[in-house]
Image: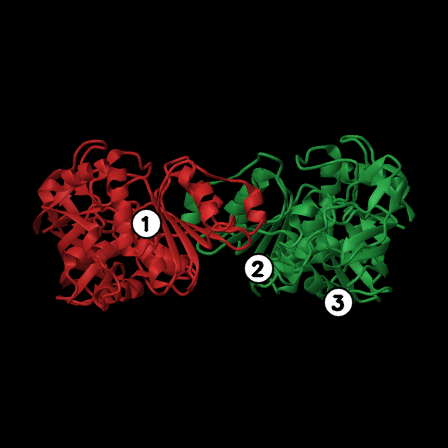
Chain colours: A green, B red
């Protein structure tokens, strides 16, 4: 079938929206008609050429939500008409990691996915001059996509898809960092560095876990206002003096839980230094630049701080995303404020521009 | 009273064994007649002048064991005749940290202890030309010492004191890193970097926790032999290729638990890199040099590794040390091989020389 899609042709150049061919889903694969897709930093990171593992041509996009249109042979997990959120982090349910409660990093299709292919090693996207590769196993900057069934989370059809798509990446990452990775305890003090999609999700996650104090740190007053809306009890402008300010606010000790959601390694270091002596846990959720390191003074560890990291918030996607969506529908989460712009697919590059300008939290493409 | 003690007079110079005055224990304090004291790296670190918080003159030594000789006013935790292990990490039992299971870092007397004084801000040690300060709240390179009652662990009098002293620092640090800080699970795979006192203790701790595989890494074949004696199932010579070798030995994933017991930040980094994707925990027990940092590639965290640190093995001293000693007396631990040299107090500087040469594991001073 023919469809319109945003193709990364050349690193550092705008995506080119064009008509491409999409083949039918093969065994274990599903054809999804996309309803909405968020524009995320990871898309821009790859489009810019900064990601050393990037490739082109490829259809970008990974924060998608839509409706199952057709299924390939043997598909048992979804059926036509199901509402789904796309998962760049799949859940096969059978591998060593899926069977273990401690991790959500499914091992089933990593290699092929990282190379831009479906599990059988081929692409479903093409045009006259040849193959176009998938991106993150999702390629949701398009009217349709073909994806492995293990990479689709079936959600309540009551959930509006133009907000449900946020659960495909940023929002689940932030929520899960607090709920799963850190396992924030009720009554605790938390600090969240960064108030973008992931940081705001972490603030909301801390709130859902019953944290008593949630300090949001960002460079933008506008974002700090959004953080207050998600449950931050205090806010601080970021900068060099912020660790000292946090220690002052916490009796000289630091916070029980700190979260890093900026990808800046200097901020990661602040998040470690703001964690409480004795038992403070710093959870890194941001993605650092190539070659950068988080430099920790070992004494901070010896005196009881811990450091962890979180990919997709430790959420096992097929099981976990529907539950988070249910909490939203039950009124526990206010997702509306995250969607700052609605765009058409033709405007995808404007989504990148808005992101680079720091305008709003999320642009969502509606199909 | 008069006693002989090893005094740090000048940084970088040998300790000077001499007669000094020891005042009577005041309220809450205890006079201990020392029977034995291990010579530990921390003593040498301070004697060398490398420790920026060091001071002189002071009586060094902190890995002591002895017998209570007299008690000051109001002392309720020990009585004359009790056999005790000295604790540089006290346990008041009342502070916020003592009341919390997550940490052993008692807050009661930190400041005065760090400055070389008893909790009331004064020293019990002096000579004609003035005050001599305590070291780590212990000062056990001496025939006697005065210590706060909260810094003494009462142990089974059946335990030979010339080995019980090892529980005052290195051995408990290693054992506790595995038992308390990491909480090694039965059946797991562990890697311990460094096979000195702390590393060997960690190997033994992993064994006590029921680890299935324990890989000991060191630069010395002789020490690796000792590690096998403590329960290491595999050994490796350290070096640049060791991470790759560990990954190869663990199906490409890394170990469930890794321990760093060298204080070398490059080795700390290897310990992080050897921890398993998904859930591997790296526990840092070694003390790094001033200004050095542990540099971590954040991707290692994002993909599920965790980093923790351990001071005195997370052992709450008054409760925890007697239990470890009991396990030794019950035959669960073989402490004999750790004591490589027996010295008199006059030979304390030889203990430092042996340590610098890497000869044996521990020199113990017998009084």
Question: Which residue is more in the foreground, B257 or B83?
Answer: B257
| In this rendering, position of residue A127 left or right of residue B310 | right
User: Residue A231 location, x and y as percent?
Assistant: 68, 58
State the separation of the CA atoms marked 3 and 1: 48 Å
Same-subunit check for callouts 3 and 1: no
State the separation of the CA atoms marked 3 and 2: 28 Å
Where residue B199 is drawn, which disc sits there?
Answer: 1
User: Residue A134 location, x and y as percent?
Assistant: 77, 44
Q: Is residue A155 visible?
A: yes
Label 3 CA crowd tier, 10 Å (few <14, some 14–19, many 20+): some
Label 2 CA crowd tier, 10 Å (few <14, some 14–19, many 20+): few
Image-quadrant location for residue A154:
bottom right
| In this rendering, position of residue B108 left or right of residue A46 | left
Q: Chain of mark 2?
A: A
B56 is higher (above) or lower (below) than A150: above
Helix or strand or loop: what does disc 2 sit on? loop
Question: Which residue is more in the foreground, B103 or A147?
Answer: A147
Q: Nearer the viewer, mark 1 or mark 2?
A: 2
The residue to which callout 2 is attached is: A96
Q: Is residue A337 visible?
A: no
User: Residue A204 location, x and y as percent?
Assistant: 68, 58
What residue is shown at x 71% (from left), y 63% (from top)? A324
Q: Chain of mark 3?
A: A
Q: Chain of mark 1?
A: B
| In this rendering, position of residue A228 left or right of residue B59 | right
Helix or strand or loop: what does disc 3 sit on? helix
B364 is higher (above) or lower (below) than A44: below
């Amino acid at each position: 079938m023919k469809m319109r899609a945003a193709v990364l042709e050349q690193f550092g150049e705008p995506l080119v929206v064009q008509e491409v061919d999409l083949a039918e889903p093969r065994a274990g694969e599903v054809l999804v008609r996309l309803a909405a897709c968020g524009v995320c930093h990871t898309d821009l990171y790859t489009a810019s050429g900064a990601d050393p593992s990037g490739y082109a041509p490829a259809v970008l996009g990974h924060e998608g939500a839509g409706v199952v249109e057709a299924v390939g042979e043997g598909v048992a997990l979804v059926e036509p008409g199901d509402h789904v959120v796309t998962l760049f982090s799949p859940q096969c349910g059978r591998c060593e990691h899926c069977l273990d409660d401690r991790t959500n990093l499914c091992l089933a299709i990593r290699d092929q996915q990282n190379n831009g292919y479906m599990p059988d090693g081929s692409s479903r996207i093409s045009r006259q001059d040849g193959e176009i590769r998938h991106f993150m196993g999702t390629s949701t900057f398009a009217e349709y996509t073909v994806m492995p069934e293990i990479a689709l989370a079936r959600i309540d059809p009551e959930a509006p898809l133009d907000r449900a798509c946020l659960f495909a990446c940023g929002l689940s990452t932030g929520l899960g960092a607090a709920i799963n990775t850190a396992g924030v305890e009720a009554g605790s003090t938390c600090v969240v560095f960064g108030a973008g999609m992931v940081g705001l999700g972490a603030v909301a996650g801390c709130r859902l876990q019953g944290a008593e104090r949630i300090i949001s740190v960002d460079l933008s007053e506008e974002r700090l206002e959004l953080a207050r809306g998600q449950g931050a009890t205090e806010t601080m402008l970021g900068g060099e003096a912020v660790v000292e300010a946090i220690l002052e606010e916490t009796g000289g000790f630091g916070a029980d839980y700190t979260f890093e959601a900026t990808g800046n390694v200097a901020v990661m270091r602040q998040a470690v230094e703001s964690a409480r002596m004795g038992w403070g846990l710093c959870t890194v959720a941001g993605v650092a630049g190539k070659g950068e390191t988080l430099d920790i003074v070992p004494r901070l560890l010896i005196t009881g701080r811990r450091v962890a990291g979180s990919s997709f918030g430790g959420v096992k996607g097929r099981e976990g995303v529907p539950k988070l969506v249910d909490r939203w529908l039950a009124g526990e989460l206010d997702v509306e404020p995250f969607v700052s712009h609605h765009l058409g697919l033709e405007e995808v590059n404007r989504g990148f521009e808005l992101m680079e300008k720091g305008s709003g939290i999320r642009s969502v493409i509606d199909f």
